[in-house]
Image (cartoon, rainbow, N blue to C red):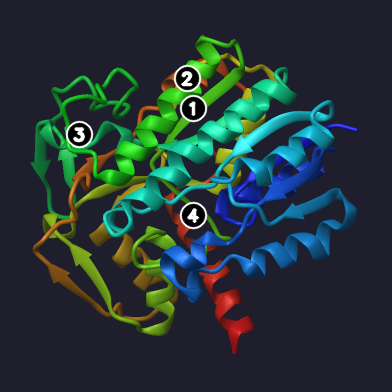
């Protein structure tokens, strides 16, 4: 029996991965204690997602409600199944740089210590397994804000003469000498640990530095889940606040299925210690203003939003990741969802959950 162990298994990427891997014939053990509800409140709980996985996958999925900060809670899973675990997919995290400032110790122990626990248990019990980590573009801190940016009507854009213009920001950008936010710092620690376990111990580790990860299964909240929360506000008329940069800040967006498919390609032919920027790239990106306009067009509703001139600390003005490196290593992988397709699916997912809540 081949087992994939997925942390954050009821979250957006985790749940997508659980279904994907089960369809590929793997049994899946999910580790998730719904800390998202603690971070962002009951509306962000992933309990509904856990129930859905258990109800639809049956004995192909086993859920473990463990805290990744607690080595003693994780070790029995690895001890019992180490010989069968072929993949450790680590998606669990505290994901908000705003929230991290409220409880820095919680943020760091979840993101950094939790990752170290999983790496060490993998090394001890299943060293031949692939280890995939969902990092973040926030490891680059606010260095992207130093790029030569041009203000256009609905967005900021990088100057056409810059090397990053054609494809976006690649992995050559330094992660040093920059304001990361505490969240960014904790993810840097985890990111470097994953690389080191690949390079020093030879584990089959891969680091994926994502932009905005999204999809219909996202439990969006104001502090995390850009498109999902925007879609929820578009459908309900709830007030939405845009923070800084005239609403023209740009993000690339990748559909959860496209990201998990990238993980699958890496799992098939892992390259130890590799780091990849991963996201929608030039194929799927938008500014806040463009996302609002798109949501209004799809829903047929006027969006209720306001503007605050104070931007979030360490927030990017323009992020479009260059995914050329991953494509060159795995040429059979490609993005299936463009920006419009992503937005339609996110809105549809929010419609379903709002209807279920009534």
Separation of residues labelled 1 and 2 (CA atoms)? 7 Å
The secondary structure type at the circle numbered 1 is strand
Separation of residues labelled 2 and 3 (CA atoms)? 22 Å
Separation of residues labelled 1 and 3 (CA atoms)? 20 Å
Q: Earlier in the sequence, mark 2 or mark 4?
A: 2
Q: Tell me the residue that label 3 is attached to.
A: 144
Give coordinates of residue 224: x percent, y percent: 38, 59
Q: Quadrant of the C terminus?
A: bottom right
Q: Quadrant of the N terminus?
A: top right
Q: For this rendering, which residue is in front, 78 or 278?
A: 78
Confirm or deny contact between disc 1 and disc 3 (CB under 8 A). Answer: no
Mark 4 crowd level (few <14, some 14–19, many ≥20, 10 Å Cα): many
Q: Tell me the residue that label 2 is attached to.
A: 195
Q: Earlier in the sequence, mark 1 or mark 2?
A: 2
Q: For this rendering, which residue is in front, 103 or 129?
A: 103
Mark 3 crowd level (few <14, some 14–19, many ≥20, 10 Å Cα): many
Apparent side of residue 94 relative to residue 34 in the rendered image (left or right) = left
Residue 184: quarter of image: top left
Confirm or deny contact between disc 4 and disc 1 (CB under 8 A). Answer: no
Residue 342 bears which disc, if any? 4
Give coordinates of residue 34: x percent, y percent: 58, 62
Mark 2 crowd level (few <14, some 14–19, many ≥20, 10 Å Cα): many
């Amino acid at each position: 029996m081949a087992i994939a162990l997925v942390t954050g298994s009821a979250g957006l990427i985790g749940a997508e991965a659980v279904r994907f891997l089960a369809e590929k014939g793997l049994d899946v053990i999910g580790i998730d204690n719904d800390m998202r509800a603690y971070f962002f409140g009951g509306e962000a709980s992933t309990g509904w997602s856990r129930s859905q996985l258990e109800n639809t996958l049956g004995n192909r999925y086993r859920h473990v409600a463990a805290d990744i900060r607690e080595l003693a809670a994780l070790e029995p899973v690895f001890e019992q199944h180490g010989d069968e675990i072929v993949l450790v997919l680590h998606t669990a995290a505290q994901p908000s740089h705003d929230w991290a400032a409220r409880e820095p110790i919680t943020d760091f122990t979840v993101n950094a210590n939790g990752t170290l626990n999983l790496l060490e248990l993998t090394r001890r019990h299943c060293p031949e397994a692939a280890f995939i980590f969902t990092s973040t573009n926030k490891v680059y801190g606010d260095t992207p804000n130093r790029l030569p940016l041009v203000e256009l009507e609905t967005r900021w854009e990088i100057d056409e003469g810059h090397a990053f213009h054609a494809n976006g920001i690649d992995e050559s950008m330094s992660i040093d000498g920059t304001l990361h936010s505490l969240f960014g710092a904790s993810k840097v620690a985890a990111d470097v640990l994953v690389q080191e376990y690949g390079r020093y111990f030879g584990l089959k580790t891969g680091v994926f530095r994502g932009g905005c990860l999204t999809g219909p299964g996202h439990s969006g909240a104001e502090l995390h889940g850009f498109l999902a929360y925007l879609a929820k506000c578009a459908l309900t008329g709830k007030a939405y606040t845009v923070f800084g940069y005239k609403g023209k800040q740009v993000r690339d967006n990748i559909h959860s299925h496209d990201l998990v498919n990238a993980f699958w390609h890496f799992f098939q032919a892992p390259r130890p210690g590799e780091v990849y920027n991963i996201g929608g790239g030039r194929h799927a990106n938008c500014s806040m203003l463009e996302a609002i306009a798109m949501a209004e067009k799809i829903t047929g509703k006027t969006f209720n939003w306001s503007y605050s001139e104070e931007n979030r600390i360490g927030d990017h003005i323009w992020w479009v990741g260059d995914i050329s490196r991953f494509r060159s290593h795995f040429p059979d992988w490609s993005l299936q969802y463009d920006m419009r397709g992503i937005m339609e699916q996110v809105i549809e997912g929010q419609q379903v959950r709002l209807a279920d809540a009534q």
